[in-house]
Image (cartoon, rainbow, N blue to C red):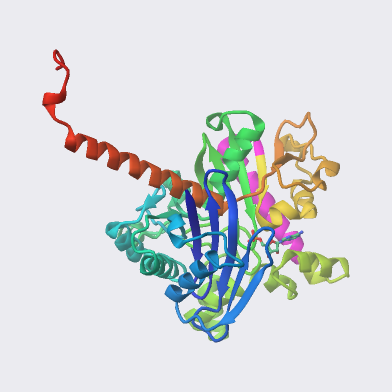
Amino acid sequence: MKVLVINAGSSSLKYQLYDMTTEKVLAKGRVERIGLDASILTHEVENKPDMREVSEILDHTTAIKKVIEMLVHRKFGVLHSMDEIEAVGHRVVHGGESFSKSVLINEEVKLEIRRLFDLAPLHNPAHMMGITAVEDNLPNIPQAVVFDTAFHQTMPKHTYLYAIPTVLYRKHKVRRYGFHGTSHDYVSKAASHYLKRPLEELKLITCHIGNGASCTAIMNGKSYDTSMGMTPLEGLMMGTRSGDMDPAIVPYAISKEDLTMNEINSMLNKHSGLLGISGVSGDLREVIEAMDEGNNNAKVAFEMYVYRIKKYIGAYIAAMNGVDAIIFTAGVGENSSILRQKVCEDMSFFGIDFDEAKNVVRSSEPRDITSDESKVKVLVVPTNEELIIARDTYRLVLEAIETEKARAEAETFKPSELPEGSD
Ligand code: AMP
């Protein structure tokens, strides 16, 4: 079965086409600047030249049409016909309290995703545009949705509630949801496999450190607590997001700087974090480069970034009464050896015996970066959110086919066909 994975943003759309018999990516690409002038489509296939096309793509329906054209293209394509695409899986950021696992799309699911627009105004409407665009182009194809929040629906009340009047939770669902769930789920399972120990026995702390960043405490394979909250702004310091801060800063800054609600929101999401402190960049590579050249603001930004990851690890060790492994993943977590080293520095109290030589080895496979004797393991596990979306979609479609088969069999079942003597 070939499954197309879509991650739709408001003006962009990323895609990967999987062959699920081998779990191989047949093609991948992105459409950028949808609805703006000069939209760009880039398309990659192994052993074929990369394709880049600039044209006017006014909406998501046209973007999906272009993607399909590219997938069946005589020179750059990988399919003979679009009928070969048998299912589509979508990433959806917010599933609220309604979705604790991936589901196939139907009218009820679409309605619920729309109801959740308020909780993720920048993301869910864009995902919905992606879903509608697939319906417009491939009307009869099964589609599934995989939610960033679903994995964290196991968090207990005392970790997901905010200490504010509960009327806000009851009336408006103000609570902590957590994000990057597909990634935390995937790397925790990969870690259990690598350690050859059942997930149900393990206490894990997964650190998804990319452009956005979050840590999760996982006990018995279930999310117990995570650093992001009602939105992805809470928790760790990120590329351009502030992470945790005193909420009283918001009204204070608004009054002192005469800011609008949009301006303060933009300041906290797009101009804070590494960028806000270093004044250099939200990209850790550039911050480290500036730090190495003697930029003191960049040095402080890096120290804060490291310190806050350390703080969450310490808090989660206390919350779980121990830890078996700490896992680094995503753009920064997988690639920055200096970040991992600084986070794990001076953590021998917890039983971490960090191995600097192992830490600098590069690999696309899960690996251990502690000594063989280390009581607590530190692993680097490459994440793969698209593969999880493809797997969930494939599984849900197969289950639906089986259910339909059983239903059809039950419908055609005639008691007279029973062998004699049966009840
Ligand atoms: P992600 O959001 O997981 O795609 O991660 C993207 C981020 O990873 C980029 O913004 C970079 O800041 C960061 N990154 C990638 N490679 C490195 C590296 N070698 N050192 C530090 N940061 C990196």
Instruction: Indicate the position of residue 378 as horizontal and vertical percent values.
Output: 71, 40
Q: Residue at x 11, y 25 (%)?
A: 416
Q: Is residue 342 magenta?
A: no
Q: How many marks?
A: 0
Q: Nearer the viewer, residue 232 or 407?
A: 407
- Report the span colored magenta: 301-325
Q: Nearer the viewer, residue 371 or 263?
A: 371
Q: Nearer the viewer, residue 262 or 212?
A: 212
Residue 293 falls in image quadrant: bottom right
Determine whether, in the image, residue 417 is placed left or right of residue 253: left
Q: Is residue 309 magenta?
A: yes
Ligand 1 shown in quarter: bottom right
Determine whether, in the image, residue 267 is placed left or right of residue 300: left
Q: Residue at x 53, y 43 (%)?
A: 21
Residue 367 falls in image quadrant: top right
Say if 29 sits above or below 372 in the image: below
Do we see residue 177 in this rendering? no
Q: Residue at x 14, y 15 (%)?
A: 420
Q: Nearer the viewer, residue 91 or 297?
A: 91
Instruction: Indicate the position of residue 4 as horizontal and vertical percent values.
Output: 49, 57
| SS majority, magenta | helix
Residue 404 falls in image quadrant: top left
Say if 317 sits above or below 31 in the image: above
Instruction: Indicate the position of residue 195 as horizontal and vertical percent values.
Output: 66, 32
Q: Going by the picture, which residue comes out furthest to the top? A: 421
Do we see residue 218 in this rendering? yes
Say if 113 sits above or below 2 in the image: below
Screen quadrant of the C terminus: top left
Instruction: Indicate the position of residue 9 as horizontal and vertical percent values.
Output: 50, 70
Q: Going by the picture, which residue comes out furthest to the left? A: 416
